[in-house]
């Protein structure tokens, strides 16, 4: 199978690429133009894929073709490619997105996430793709359940879903929507090519052992019981591959929510051993006390940015996703602390610097 993939240099897209390559599929990747010459975009893609510790059996050099383009342009700037790829590409997987919880960036979010999705669908239609997988977010749950979206980011994702449904019907293309919660590195290696999304919060915890020693007195409304629903990237990638391999059945929407939501105290305990802090010290420390003012200010800034997601567990039907995992032989996500330690070890090894 030949798959058109966007977002290949991101967390979900890179993991999806490795998963598809392992399964013997070929990938046509949309790559943003970068400085360094006409082949710089391809070199960046290959560098990221080859950095994945699990990519030894995923031959990127021979099975990944990169095309330079821009989500914000009509047909992503690939209109002239019709003669080359029409009838040759089986499916499109759209992972690329602008991730920001700053509502002042609403216009840019809609341009990239809604307009970009329409442009990718245009390419898929141009090439005659029969399947289209869109990676949305499980946090559209509030708007779907009759409430108000937490952020403009969520609004843009839900609007993109609706626009793609119309485009897919018009193009006679099967649309599959994958809605993950908060995505982190994979369960085995903790790999991520960049440290966006929830990573600034995890990095703060890993770099500030003093925070771990004072976990019961987090400022900004965080408590030891505050929940975060984390999901490993390999779960999302496995679902994408299973959909493309025809295991979806009649289902078209897959809500990926970890049945185990992490408490702030659980994350602290998982982090403790890496930072030289005794787990028992965290568990036994009574509430009270204050963080140093500089740490408190930094943490409060992070809390403000992620306020809608700290303590929020998406309320969506996960039955179709669980059934798909069962059919495809995929393990359900869980609360194994080794996974979080792998995520943190990767960050520490990389010194929290993007590839």
Image (cartoon, helix red, strand yellow):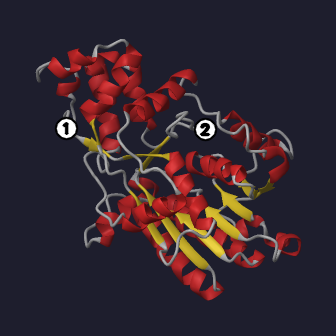
Residue sitting at x 55%, y 33%: 189
Side of 68 where 155 appears, left or right: left
What residue is disc 2 on? 193
Observer able to see residue 166:
yes
Report the quarter where the C terminus lies: top right
Q: Is residue 103 above or below residue 300?
A: below
Residue 79, x across and y down, in percent:
79, 72
- Please provide percent x and percent y for residue 330: 50, 53
Q: Secondary structure at mark 2?
A: loop
Q: Kindly indicate the quadrant of the structure image that contains residue 23.
A: bottom right
Which percent across, then down, holds residue 246?
61, 70
* Mark toward the start of the polypeptide (1 vs 2): 2
Residue at figure coordinates x 76%, y 50% from the top left = 33
Q: Residues within 10 Å of mark 2 (few under 14, many from 20)?
A: many
> Residue 122, which numbered label?
none
Viewer-proximal residue among 331 and 194:
331
Is residue 152 in sight in this rendering?
A: no
Between the C-alphas of marks 1 and 2, the distance is: 30 Å
Please report the residue visible at 59 percent of the width from the left and 81 percent of the height from the top: 168
Say which residue label 1 marks: 225
Helix, strand or loop at mark 1: loop
Report whether 80 appears left or right of 247.
right
Rendered residue at 63%/81% (across/down) = 173
In the depicted structure, whether residue 204 falls above or below residue 143: above
Name the one closer to the observer, 219 or 12: 12
In the image: residue 210, left or right of residue 34: left
* Depth order, front residue of 202/23: 23
* Vertical order, 171 against 207 (above or below): below
On the image, the x and y values in percent for residue 81 come to: 84, 69
Q: Quadrant of the N terminus?
A: bottom right
């Amino acid at each position: 199978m030949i798959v058109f993939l966007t977002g290949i240099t991101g967390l979900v897209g890179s993991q999806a690429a490795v998963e598809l390559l392992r399964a013997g599929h070929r990938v046509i990747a949309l790559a943003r133009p970068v400085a360094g010459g006409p082949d710089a975009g391809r070199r960046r893609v290959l560098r990221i894929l080859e950095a994945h510790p699990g990519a030894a059996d995923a031959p990127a050099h021979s099975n990944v073709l990169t095309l330079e383009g821009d989500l914000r342009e009509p047909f992503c700037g690939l209109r002239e490619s019709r003669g080359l790829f029409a009838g040759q590409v089986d499916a499109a997987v759209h992972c690329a997105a602008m991730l920001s919880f700053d509502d002042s960036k609403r216009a840019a979010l809609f341009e990239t996430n809604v307009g970009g999705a329409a442009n990718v669908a245009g390419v898929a239609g141009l090439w005659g793709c029969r399947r289209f997988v869109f990676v949305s977010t499980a946090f559209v749950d509030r708007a779907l359940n009759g409430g108000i979206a937490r952020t403009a980011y969520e609004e843009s994702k839900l609007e993109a879903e609706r626009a793609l449904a119309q485009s897919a019907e018009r193009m006679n293309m099967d649309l599959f929507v994958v809605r993950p919660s908060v995505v982190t590195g994979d369960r085995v290696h903790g790999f991520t090519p960049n440290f966006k999304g929830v990573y600034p919060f995890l990095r703060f915890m890993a770099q500030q052992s003093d925070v771990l020693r004072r976990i019961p007195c987090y400022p900004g409304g965080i408590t030891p019981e505050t929940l975060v629903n984390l999901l490993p990237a390999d779960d999302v990638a496995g679902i994408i591959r299973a959909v493309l391999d025809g295991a979806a059945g009649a289902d078209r929407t897959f809500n990926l929510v970890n049945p185990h939501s992490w408490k702030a105290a659980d994350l602290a305990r998982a982090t403790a051993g890496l930072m030289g802090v005794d787990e028992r010290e965290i568990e036994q420390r009574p509430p009270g006390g204050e963080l140093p003012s500089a740490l408190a200010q930094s943490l409060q800034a992070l809390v403000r940015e992620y306020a809608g997601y700290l303590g929020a567990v998406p309320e969506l039907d996960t039955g179709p996703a669980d059934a798909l995992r069962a059919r495809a032989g995929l393990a359900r996500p869980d609360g194994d602390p080794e996974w979080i330690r792998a995520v943190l070890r990767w960050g520490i090894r990389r010194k929290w610097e993007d590839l």
